[in-house]
Image: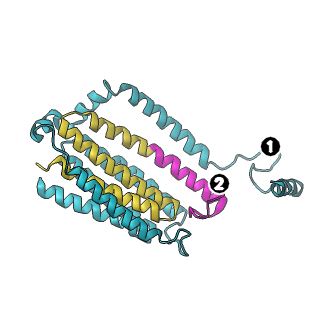
Chain colours: A cyan, B yellow
Amino acid sequence: MTLAFYLLGALAIIGGVITIGARNAVHAALGLVGTLLAVAGLFATMNAAFLAATQVIVYAGAIMVLFLFVIMMLNANAPVTGKDPVPFVRELAGIGGTLIAGAFVVIAYTYKDPRPLAEGAAAVRGGTAQAVGETLLTRFLLPFEVVSVLLLVAVVGAVALVQRPAPQPDGFAEGAALPASHAGAELEREVQV
Amino acid sequence: MVSTASYVALSGILFALGLVGVLTRRTAIMAFLSVELMLNAANIALVAFARAWGDLMGQTAVFIVMTLAAAEVAIGLAIIVSIFRKRETTNVDDLASLKG
């Protein structure tokens, strides 16, 4: 168990470093996939079987595929060149990040387990789908329903945001090139603003 | 058994990595990937505390966070795609037209 923790933890951190350091966006996304799979393993070592499976299917599967699709579709895998407008942002972020990570580690080790870990691990009943589902449909029933509405909003919103404007009856697609008179009016309004 | 503190420390390190990513990366998609890293760090801590207290609430909260992340990614990537269509860039430094 200890070996699994250190191995998976190291993999997660390596994946995280690749995510924030890779110049190519596809490499960064694949680094994040590595982190997500390592985190799924960590869930499994903490008696969270259902979450480990969900992590692999939803996160490493669905969400990262969406990311890779968009990165490749926008051809965004080329690194951004040129000078960063914020001076010394890398150095400052590196120093600040190290300090924050150090503070987190120091604070984390002040935490004492409230009871023997084996007892707690037994109480979560392996984190199976049945155990999590019972909590989800009793104590978490309202959040569960609200999340379903949220997902509906997300689906409708995503479709509405990326759909092409529908062709208008007069032949001009909304948002397409306006006739010259319109374009002139637009320009005037912009100048006034 | 590995102590809860070790898991929370790992979670803190991953969170700091994500934070550095958000601060330094300059395309919207890369900042977004770093946010996902931070969400996962928080999930590790939640599951660790669920085990420490023997309460499944933590794991259920992680499940809801995952759902939220999926919704957030769908909307966020849709916004990035529609910005890219209008502006031909996802570099956050060029998308400063709302700057006061």
Residue pointed to by mark 2 = B98
Q: Is residue A147 above or below residue A44?
A: above
Q: Image quadrant of residue A169?
A: top right
Q: Image quadrant of residue A125?
A: top left
Label 2 marks which chain's residue? B
Query: Which numbered tag is attached to residue A72?
Result: none
Q: Residue at x 19, y 40 (%)?
A: B51
Label 2 sits on a secondary structure element that is loop
Q: Is residue A159 left or right of residue A22?
A: right
Label 1 marks which chain's residue? A
| Residue extent of the magenta highlight | B71-100
Q: Between label 1 and label 2, give the one nearer the viewer.
A: 2
Looking at the rendered structure, the kind of residue marked 2 is: Leu
Q: Residue at x 49, y 68 (%)?
A: A77
Q: Is residue A55 visible?
A: yes
Q: Is residue A142 left or right of residue B4?
A: right
Q: Is residue B23 left or right of residue A14?
A: right
Residue A53 x/y as whole percent: 27, 45
B79 falls in the magenta region:
yes
Q: Residue at x 22, y 44 (%)?
A: B48
Residue pointed to by mark 1 = A169
Looking at this rendering, what residue extends furthest in the bottom direction? A82
Residue A149 x/y as whole percent: 48, 32
- Mark 1 vs mark 2, CA separation in Å: 34 Å
Q: Front-most of A189 and A62?
A: A189
Looking at the rendered structure, the kind of residue marked 1 is: Pro
Circles 1 and 2 on the same chain: no
